[in-house]
Amino acid sequence: MTLREKKALQQGRGWLEAVLLVSILSVLVVIAVPKFYDYEADANVSALKGLKSGIDSASTRTYALAKAEKITDQPAQSLTVDGIDIGVTYGYPQISALPKLVSALQDTTRWQIRRYPEQNRVDFIWLFHEQPAPACYLMYQEATASQQASTTLVIGESCQSPAAEKQRE
């Protein structure tokens, strides 16, 4: 075999290797990458984090106004926040007042609400493509005489993706 023939064979093999490499990479991109990155879970977590921020902000503002009015020690009272008359419990907004204070909750087509009246609690589940993600939700615990109102972001196993897990940490 001459030197010229060897070079010609090597050039052909180089193109074959390049085509094979591109084929393997494209298969990996199409099949493997979506399994490691779940866009829907990230969207659910992002929506819930935004709602949590809105509720926390409204609760803090309401409590500050209630403290100024000296009604933070009363179980049920009415308070005007930004021109809106709402019910407060120990200075924090009642569950029924949240949609009036947090504009994201006014769009009822985006949120599913689970109520637990015996526990003074409500869960907000974000609907992604009109499908609820019940493993990921935001829990709002209404204030009682012994504890203040709180919001807790609950992220279940089906909502965890590598990106969502990094955001949580």
Image (cartoon, helix red, strand yellow):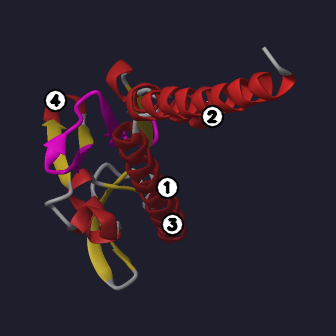
Which is more N-terminal, label 1 or label 4? 1
In the rendered image, is residue 21 in sight? yes
Return the residue found at the far top. 1
N-terminal of the pair, mark 1 or mark 2, is: 2
Which range is magenta? 125-149
Element marked by disc 3 = helix
Q: Is residue 84 above or below residue 56?
A: below
Other residues around mark 1 within 10 Å, as few (<14) / some (14–19) / many (≥20): some
- Tell me if 122 is positioned left or right of 157 in this view: left
Q: Nearer the viewer, mark 1 or mark 3?
A: 1
Label 3 sits on residue: 61
* CB within 8 Å, label 1 to label 3: no
- Of 164 and 91, which appears nearest the observer? 164
| Residue at (43, 26) in percent of width and height | 160
Name the residue beneath numbered marker 1. Answer: 53
Image quarter where the C terminus lies is top right
Q: Residues within 10 Å of mark 4 (few under 14, many from 20)?
A: few
The amino acid type found where label 3 is placed reads: Arg
Which residue occupies 39% across, 47% down? 43
Q: Measuring from the top left, give residue 168's x and y in whole percent.
A: 57, 33
Estimate the x, y position of residue 38 in percent, counting from the top left.
40, 35
Q: Are marks 1 and 2 in contact (CB under 8 Å)?
A: no
Q: Is residue 37 left or right of residue 141?
A: right
Question: Mark 4 is on which residue type?
Answer: Glu
Depth check, mark 1 against mark 2: the one in front is 2
Label 2 sits on what residue type? Trp
Lower sequence index among marks 1 and 3: 1
The image shows residue 60, relative to residue 48, as above or below, that is below
Residue on which disc 4 sits? 118
Residue on which the image places disc 2:
15
